[in-house]
C-alpha cells in the first residue's frame, strides 16, 4: 500500500504580496508584512514530514508543470493568457483576491502539474494513493477567472486528466476545505462524469454561494452536491454529514477515482474558518474516504492540499492525514489531541443533526430524480 508524495520548492515561492487579506494598506489600514496565504503552513507541514522521518517512507513523485493545453481543458484561453500577462508585467491582482508576483505563472503551472503527477502515479499503479503539497491552491479558480487565492483549478484539472488520459467515466471530488469549492463546481456543473461534493461553512466566503439547491445544470443536474454547515461544527457534525450524506452519495456513484480537495481551514485554529476540526477529525475523514476508494476505485485516492492558514496547527493536521493515508505512524504527537474530548463542540449537537437529516433527505430526492 504505497503512498506517493509530491511537492516542489517552486510552490513555496508563490508570493501573493503583503496585503492583509484583500485590504490594500492606506487610510487606517496598516501594512502587514505577510499575506494570509503565505508559505508557512505548507512549508512547516513539509518540514514536519521530513524531520519525523515520514518523508523517507513515502514514495516521492516527480513534480512537473501543467501544460497550457492541459489548462485549456477547463480554463478559457482568455484566462490563461491573462495569468501569463499579469505575471509577465510584474505581477498583480488576477481577479478577486488572487494576487500573484512576477513568478506567479511558473508557480501556478507547477502547482496544477503536481496534481496531475499525483493522478498519473495513482492511475499507473506506481502508488495506491498520493498527496500533493502545493500552492497556489485551486478550488476557487473558475474556468474564466481566478479568485480566493486560487489561480488554476487544480483538483478539477486532476479529475479531467484521469478522464482524458485514463478513460475514467466516474471521478468523485470531495472538497472538505472550509470554503465552498465554487471553481470546481463551475468546471463540472454541466457534467455527470464527475460527482463534485463540497462540504463547507455556509456563506463562509462572501464571494460565492454553495447552497444545497445548487445541484448542477443540464446533464449535470444531481451531480453537484453542496453540504453547507453552520459555523461551529466539530468532528461530530462532520462525521454525521459524511456518514449520512457524503458516503451514501459516493457509494451510489461508485467512483473509479476519488480526489480530495484537502483544505485544513475547517481546523479549529484557522483564521479564515469557524469550524472545530482537529487531528482526530482529519484522521477519521481520511480513513472514511480511503474506505470509499477501497470499495469502488481499487483504493485509488488523490489528495490535493488546498487552504489552511494556521501555521502552527496545519502541520499536525497534515501529518494526521498523511499517517492515516500511508498507515505509517511516526512518533509525532499532535499537541492538540488532548483537547479533543474536553471540547463540547466536537460532539454532534441536536440542531446540527436535524440539519444533516434535512440535507440528507434533500439529496436523496435529488438522486431519485436525476440519477
Ligand atoms: Zn478555504
Image (tube, helix red, strand yellow):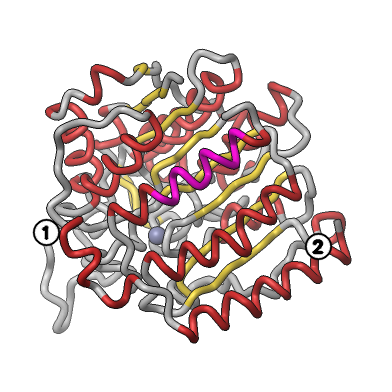
Q: Nearer the viewer, mark 2 or mark 1?
A: 2
Q: Where is residue 25 shown, x and y percent of the image?
A: 18, 71
Rendered position, 130 above or below 273: above
Which region shows up in magenta? 284-294
- Mark seen at residue 367: 2
| Disc 1 packing (10 Å; few <14; some 14–19; many ≥20) | few
Position of the C terminus, as image quadrant, is: bottom right
Q: Quadrant of residue 201?
A: bottom left
**Which of the two residues, 350 or 155, is positioned nearer the viewer here?**
350
Cβ–Cβ under 8 Å for marks 2 and 1: no
User: Is tag 2's residue or tag 1's residue first in the polypeptide sequence?
Assistant: 1
The count of marks equals 2
To which residue does mark 1 refer? 33
Look at the numbered disc 1 and give the secondary structure of its residue: loop
Taking the magenta stretch, the answer to whether it contains residue 38 is no
**Which of the two residues, 280 or 260, is positioned nearer the viewer here?**
280
Q: Is mark 2 within 8 Å of ligand 1?
A: no
| Disc 2 packing (10 Å; few <14; some 14–19; many ≥20) | some
Between the C-alphas of marks 2 and 1, the distance is 48 Å
Rendered position, 8 above or below 265: above
Seen at 18% across and 46% down, the residue is 40
Look at the numbered disc 2 and give the secondary structure of its residue: helix
Instruction: State left or right for residue 240 relative to residue 361.
Output: left
Rendered position, 185 above or below 48: below
Dominant secondary structure of the magenta stretch?
helix
Seen at 49% across and 72% down, the residue is 207
Seen at 46% across and 38% down, the residue is 303
Rendered position, 29 above or below 85: below
Residue that extends furthest to the bottom in the rendered view of this protein: 351
Q: Where is residue 263 shown, x and y percent of the image?
A: 39, 52
- Mark seen at residue 192: none
Amino acid at each position: 500500500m504505497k503512498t506517493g508524495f509530491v511537492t516542489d520548492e517552486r510552490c513555496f515561492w508563490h508570493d501573493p504580496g503583503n496585503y492583509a487579506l484583500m485590504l490594500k494598506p492606506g487610510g487606517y489600514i496598516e501594512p502587514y508584512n505577510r499575506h494570509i496565504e503565505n508559505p508557512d503552513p505548507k512549508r512547516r507541514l513539509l518540514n514536519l514530514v521530513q524531520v519525523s522521518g515520514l518523508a523517507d517512507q513515502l514514495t516521492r513523485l516527480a513534480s512537473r508543470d501543467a501544460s497550457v493545453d492541459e489548462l485549456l481543458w477547463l480554463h478559457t484561453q482568455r484566462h490563461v493568457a491573462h495569468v501569463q500577462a499579469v505575471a509577465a508585467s510584474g505581477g498583480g491582482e488576477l481577479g478577486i483576491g488572487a494576487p500573484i508576483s512576477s513568478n506567479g505563472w511558473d508557480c501556478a503551472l507547477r502547482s496544477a502539474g503536481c496534481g496531475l503527477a499525483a493522478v498519473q502515479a495513482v492511475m499507473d499503479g506506481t502508488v495506491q494513493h498520493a498527496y500533493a503539497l502545493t500552492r497556489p491552491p485551486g478550488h476557487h479558480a473558475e474556468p474564466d477567472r481566478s479568485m480566493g487565492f486560487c489561480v488554476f483549478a487544480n483538483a478539477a484539472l486532476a479529475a479531467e486528466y484521469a478522464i482524458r488520459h485514463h478513460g475514467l467515466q466516474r471521478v468523485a471530488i470531495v472538497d472538505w476545505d472550509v470554503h465552498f469549492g465554487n471553481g470546481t463546481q463551475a468546471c463540472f456543473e454541466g457534467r455527470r462524469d464527475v460527482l463534485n461534493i463540497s462540504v463547507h461553512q455556509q456563506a463562509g466566503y462572501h464571494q460565492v454561494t454553495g447552497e444545497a439547491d445548487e445541484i448542477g445544470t443540464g446533464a449535470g443536474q444531481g451531480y453537484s452536491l453542496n453540504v453547507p454547515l453552520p459555523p461551529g461544527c466539530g468532528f461530530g457534525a462532520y462525521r454525521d454529514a459524511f456518514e449520512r450524506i457524503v458516503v451514501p452519495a459516493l457509494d451510489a456513484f461508485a467512483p473509479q477515482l476519488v480526489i480530495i480537495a484537502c483544505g485544513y481551514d475547517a481546523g479549529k485554529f484557522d483564521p479564515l474558518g469557524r469550524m472545530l476540526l482537529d487531528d482526530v477529525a482529519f484522521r477519521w475523514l481520511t480513513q472514511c474516504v480511503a474506505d470509499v476508494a477501497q470499495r469502488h476505485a481499487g483504493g485509488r485516492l488523490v489528495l490535493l492540499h488546498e487552504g489552511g492558514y494556521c501555521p502552527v496547527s496545519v502541520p499536525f493536521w497534515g501529518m494526521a492525514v498523511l499517517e492515516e493515508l500511508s498507515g505509517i505512524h511516526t512518533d509525532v504527537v499532535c499537541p492538540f489531541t488532548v483537547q479533543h474530548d474536553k471540547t463540547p463542540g466536537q460532539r454532534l449537537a441536536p440542531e446540527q443533526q436535524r440539519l444533516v437529516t434535512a440535507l440528507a433527505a434533500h439529496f436523496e430526492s435529488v438522486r431519485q430524480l436525476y440519477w
